[in-house]
Amino acid sequence: MSRTILVLPGDGIGPEIIAEAVKLIDALKSRHGLDVELDEATIGGAGYDAAGHPLPEETLTKARAADAVLLGAVGGPQYDALPRELRPERGLLGIRKELGLFANLRPALLYPELAEASTLKREVVEGLDIMIVRELTGGIYFGEPRGVRTREDGEREGFNTLVYREHEVERIARVAFETAMKRGKRLCSVDKANVLEVSELWREVVERVGRDYPGVELSHMYVDNAAMQLIRAPKQFDVMVTTNLFGDILSDAASMLTGSIGMLPSASLNADGQGMYEPIHGSAPDIAGQGMANSLATILSVSMLLRHSLREAALADRVDAAVGTVLRQGLRTADLARGGEAVVGTAAMGDAVVAAL
Ligand SMILES: NC(=O)C1=CN([C@@H]2O[C@H](COP(=O)(O)OP(=O)(O)OC[C@H]3O[C@@H](n4cnc5c(N)ncnc54)[C@H](O)[C@@H]3O)[C@@H](O)[C@H]2O)C=CC1
Ligand SMILES: CC(C)CC(=O)C(=O)O
Ligand SMILES: [Mg+2]
């Protein structure tokens, strides 16, 4: 039986980068025997425009039935004035929650060809290979209560709740330890346990899970220090595990070690191993429609999809290698060019990857 990938282009540069990913999947089907069917649905602002909701019912139904989901990005200034429940970002949070995608893997890997593209010195980033394991369905993005209320003195205040239950920490810690076992066997848990009670519990549970993994060297770091260390000496890290908010921020920072935010893919997995795959960046409204977005993060998300959801490791390796080839050929989208290089657009980069397969 053929497997199904549900494609959700979303907003802004989403459709542009997803077009390149679809081109790649089509080439894998016709030239390398990949057996999958693609289906498409709307999410985010596109979902709101088409069906009045950022996560249309039909999209969710299709996502539940699919073997994997491939998402572009959501959001845009034209939707920012909508009531919060109807904003594109709620569609993304909603699909993550509904599918139970609690484990978000964000690899920050420097392709050697891009050592000069990083804004940091070559010696700081050369050989970089970090895996950020971000908790994705809990924490302050989902905690209740939240809102804006008027105090008795008439002043308004906004509030969100940062809450983690033990089982939520336990399962993400387990994913992180398992990930570390398959890599360099070092895990750094990032928290703010010097200030937050929720981090105290986080740390305690991570320690407890760690007893099942004596072969993994566990360390803890406060998030402010972790942000600094990522810029000072990023190669000290192997696997990092952290909360939803901290992981969101640290992974954007880590992406610049690899040359651009347009280089970082991600996999979001649930307890059954079902996955959604997306670049870590957003819809980039500032460059949308100009054909200049870097599609490599999305193309590398396809690689993660092949590896984790379709168990097609050889094809995933082929995609990773093709990305290396085009970078070696000197192709750079604008975000990767640091002067002197010829700049290619979104479609030309996608074509080159397909040609290098
Ligand atoms: N997963 C998602 O769908 C996410 C959605 N968003 C949404 O995206 C919108 C824009 O948010 P921003 O904070 O501007 O973050 P962003 O990640 O969209 O853009 C930040 C900067 O990086 C650049 N950039 C991002 N992806 C790129 C790519 N593939 N190639 C070249 N340059 C790229 C953009 O041009 C911009 O200058 C907002 O509506 C936000 O809520 C933000 C982050 C994640
Ligand atoms: C747009 C947010 C919902 C999430 C985000 O920034 C991310 O997952 O990287
Ligand atoms: Mg983010």
Image: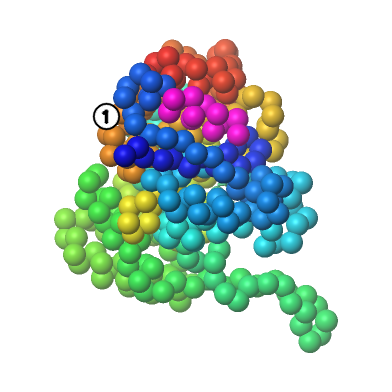
Q: Main secondary structure of the magenta part?
A: helix
Q: From the top left corner, tell me how far across and down residue 273 is, in percent.
A: 33, 52
The residue positioned 60% from the left and 48% from the top of the image is 43
Q: From the top left corner, tell me how far across and down residue 168 is, in percent.
A: 38, 68
Looking at the rendered structure, the kind of residue marked 1 is: Ala
Q: Foreground: 213 or 338?
A: 213
Magenta segment: 15-26
Q: From the top left corner, tell me how far across and down residue 13 is, in percent.
A: 63, 35
Residue 87 appears in the picture as rendered: no
Density class for disc 1 (Cα within 10 Å; few <14, some 14-19, many ≥20) is few
Q: Quadrant of the N terminus?
A: top left
Image quarter for residue 232? top left
Q: Quadrant of the C terminus?
A: top left
Label 1, on which residue?
314
The residue positioned 33% from the left and 64% from the top of the image is 171
Q: From the top left corner, tell me how far across and down residue 184 is, in percent.
A: 24, 45
The residue positioned 42% from the left and 35% from the top of the image is 37
